[in-house]
Image: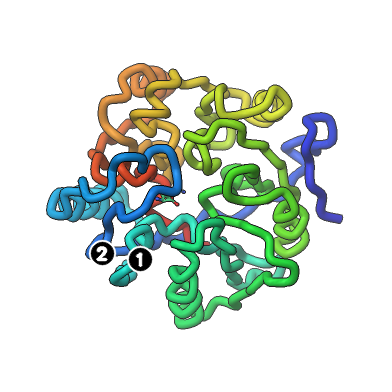
Amino acid sequence: MTRVHLKNTTIPELDTIQRRPVEQAILMVEPTHYDVLYEINPHMAGMIGTVDKELAKQQWTHLTEVYRQIGLDLKIMPGVEGLPDMVFCANQTFPFLDSTGRRRVILSKMASPYRVDEVPYFAEWYEKQGYDVIEQTDPAVDFEGMGDAIWHPNKQLLYIGYGFRTQAPALQRAADCIGCDVVGLELVNPHFYHLDTCLCVLNEQTAIFVREAFTEEGITILMRTFQNLIEVPLHEAKEGFVTNGFCPDGQHFVVQQGNKVTKHRLESDGFTVVEVDTSEFMKSGGSVFCMKMYLP
Ligand code: ARG
């Protein structure tokens, strides 16, 4: 039986939850057609037409170099003209291994009409890679992939944020389709419209989070499932996107530069903080975590 948990009290003991193989690779989308052409989150307000395209390209390329240095297997997909947000490739899909080890992928149902046309390009890419592509259309329920659905590291336990983009009925559907326990976290602050803007998991024990983005119940859940749950200053999350960093190996934490408080805290906990600049992408409401997809 797979279950959806909205309360701390029903979540199984972590050591009884099945282990999950470590992800093998990451996917990134070239920023050739990246831009801010519309406003669908508070970070984009006033940003239309302000993107420095050359700088964006440099920042993206630097990020790929950082990942290669860490030793990640990087897959690259071309961007598509007229789809400026495609570069945020955490959102259009959710790939996973089923119980037989088969690679499958759920296609997102994007909340904004501006982003709907991105999804078929990903469907095609995954098909070529040999994934089973799953379209969940009946009924249509908004679900924005790994932007809102984040694994507990190494565990068959999935956190799904809902309220702004992903809608609540997507939780049971994901649990049934993937065959895992799902923890639902209601998001309550529009600046933190995706779960990956306010919760970042670093290893099995450690996560950083933004208090203002969650309900009291949500915070109680996170306190229960992460022994080392670190609250970050609001400004480092809202302006510095610190909770949109990415820790691919439990050691390196790749994150927007300048978030001093969280950086020092994580360094004192033994993490290697790798600072990058994603200023041009933050204008669209995204940073390190959402510019890649974790591939099983
Ligand atoms: N402009 C994009 C949007 O609003 C940014 C998406 C960032 N992705 C993320 N997972 N946080 O949809």
Dot label at residue 83? 1
Q: Is residue 78 visible?
A: no
**Marker count (numbered):** 2
Q: Position of residue 163 (x, y in %)?
A: 64, 42
Q: Earlier in the sequence, mark 2 or mark 1?
A: 2
Residue 68 sits above or below residue 118 on the image: above
Residue 128 as seen in the image, left or right of residue 98: left
What is the spatial separation of the Cα atoms under label 2 and label 1, in whole angstroms?
7 Å
Please, what is the three-letter code of the amino acid marked with disc 1?
Leu
Q: Position of residue 251 (x, y in %)?
A: 40, 36
Please, what is the three-letter code of the amino acid marked with disc 2?
His
Q: Helix, strand, or loop for circle 1? A: loop
Residue indicated by mark 2: 33
Q: Quadrant of the N terminus?
A: bottom right
Q: Nearer the viewer, residue 240 or 141?
A: 141
Q: Helix, strand, or loop for circle 2? A: helix
Q: As drawn, which residue projects farthest toward the left?
A: 54
Residue 101 as seen in the image, left or right of residue 209: right
Task: Kindly check if marks 2 and 1 are in contact, taking CB atoms under 8 A apart as contact.
Answer: yes
Q: Position of residue 276 (x, y in %)?
A: 25, 39
Residue name at image x 67 percent, y 67 percent: 98
Q: As drawn, which residue projects farthest toward the right?
A: 1
Q: Nearer the viewer, residue 126 or 153?
A: 126
Residue 26 sits above or below residue 208 on the image: below
- Residue 88, by quadrant, is bottom left
Residue name at image x 70 percent, y 61 percent: 178
Residue name at image x 50 percent, y 62 percent: 113
